[in-house]
Image: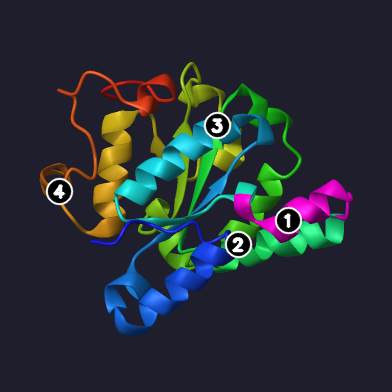
């Protein structure tokens, strides 16, 4: 299976479009928008790399040149439009939460826009679509400290939980993913995610 693409990168987005013309599995697979505070970008890069290996597309704004340019000239309209475009082109949103997230001005906006753009509200209200909005808690964050607007999503607390999430959104069992070497098992000694997530949870 093809590795995931970062759809915020113009080059990778073009490659995705070319590949998807002749491969319906590319068109149908999930794309996860990674919402995060800028200070957590290294953790997000590690998570994005894990998604790539699992054959999941993602949007990570570090490679969105138009967004980075808008940010450099402090243009809130262009920043907002770039974020909205990234969310519209995604099927899922993952909010990566650390202590720094609580000071973010953009994460609440991204979650609010994600609610409107990604979620089927009726399914979400009946807990049928929680997986579309996931909340990944980094190390040393307690679930009970989450603000209410983040408690509505699918909570991911560690490596096992992340593997289960990947299994759900790809419709492939964790065992299949392990056999494909697309996720890692608890028996492996070290993985970059160990420094980001709570092991085995």
Judging depth in this view, the residue of 37 and 4 nearest the camera is 4
> Disc 2 vs disc 4: which is toward the camera?
4
Query: For numbered disc 1, what is the local secondary structure?
Result: helix
Query: Which secondary structure dominates the residues rendered in magenta?
Result: helix
Mark toward the start of the polypeptide (2 vs 4): 2
Quarter assignment of residue 75: bottom right
Query: For numbered disc 2, what is the local secondary structure?
Result: helix
Mark toward the start of the polypeptide (1 vs 4): 1
132 in the magenta segment: no
Q: Are circles 2 and 1 on residues that touch, CB within 8 Å?
A: yes
Which residue is found at the position 45% from the left and 35% from the top? Answer: 46
Q: Which quadrant would the C terminus be assigned to in this image?
A: top left
How far apart marks 1 and 4 lie (CA) works out to 35 Å
Mark toward the start of the polypeptide (4 vs 3): 3
Which residue is found at the position 37% from the left and 77% from the top? Answer: 20
Query: For numbered disc 4, what is the local secondary structure?
Result: loop
Q: Are circles 2 and 4 on residues that touch, CB within 8 Å?
A: no
Identify the residue under disc 4.
Answer: 180
How far apart marks 3 and 1 lie (CA) works out to 18 Å
Classed neighbour count for the residue bearing mark 3: other residues with Cα under 10 Å, few (<14), some (14–19), many (≥20): few
Classed neighbour count for the residue bearing mark 2: other residues with Cα under 10 Å, few (<14), some (14–19), many (≥20): many
Identify the residue under disc 2.
Answer: 86
Identify the residue under disc 3.
Answer: 42
Which residue is found at the position 22% from the left and 18% from the top? Answer: 189
Mark toward the start of the polypeptide (2 vs 1): 1
Classed neighbour count for the residue bearing mark 4: other residues with Cα under 10 Å, few (<14), some (14–19), many (≥20): few
How far apart marks 2 and 3 lie (CA) works out to 19 Å
Identify the residue under disc 1.
Answer: 67
């Amino acid at each position: 299976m093809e590795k995931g693409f970062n759809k915020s990168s113009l080059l990778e987005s073009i490659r995705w479009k070319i590949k998807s013309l002749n491969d319906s599995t590319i068109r149908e697979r999930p794309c996860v928008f990674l919402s995060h505070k800028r200070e957590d970008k290294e953790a997000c890069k590690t998570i994005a790399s894990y998604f790539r290996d699992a054959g999941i597309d993602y949007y990570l704004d570090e490679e969105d040149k138009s967004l980075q340019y808008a940010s450099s000239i402090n243009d809130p309209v262009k920043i907002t439009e770039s974020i909205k475009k990234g969310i519209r082109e995604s099927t899922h949103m993952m909010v990566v939460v650390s202590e720094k997230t609580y000071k973010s001005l953009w994460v609440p906006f991204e979650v609010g826009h994600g609610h409107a753009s990604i979620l089927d509200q009726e399914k979400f209200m009946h807990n049928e679509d929680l997986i579309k909005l996931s909340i990944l808690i980094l190390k040393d964050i307690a679930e009970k400290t989450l603000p209410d607007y983040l408690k509505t999503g699918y909570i991911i607390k560690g490596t096992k939980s992340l593997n289960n999430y990947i299994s759900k959104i790809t419709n492939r069992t964790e065992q299949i993913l392990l056999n494909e070497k697309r996720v890692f098992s608890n028996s492996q000694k070290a993985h970059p995610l160990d420094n980001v997530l709570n092991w085995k949870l």
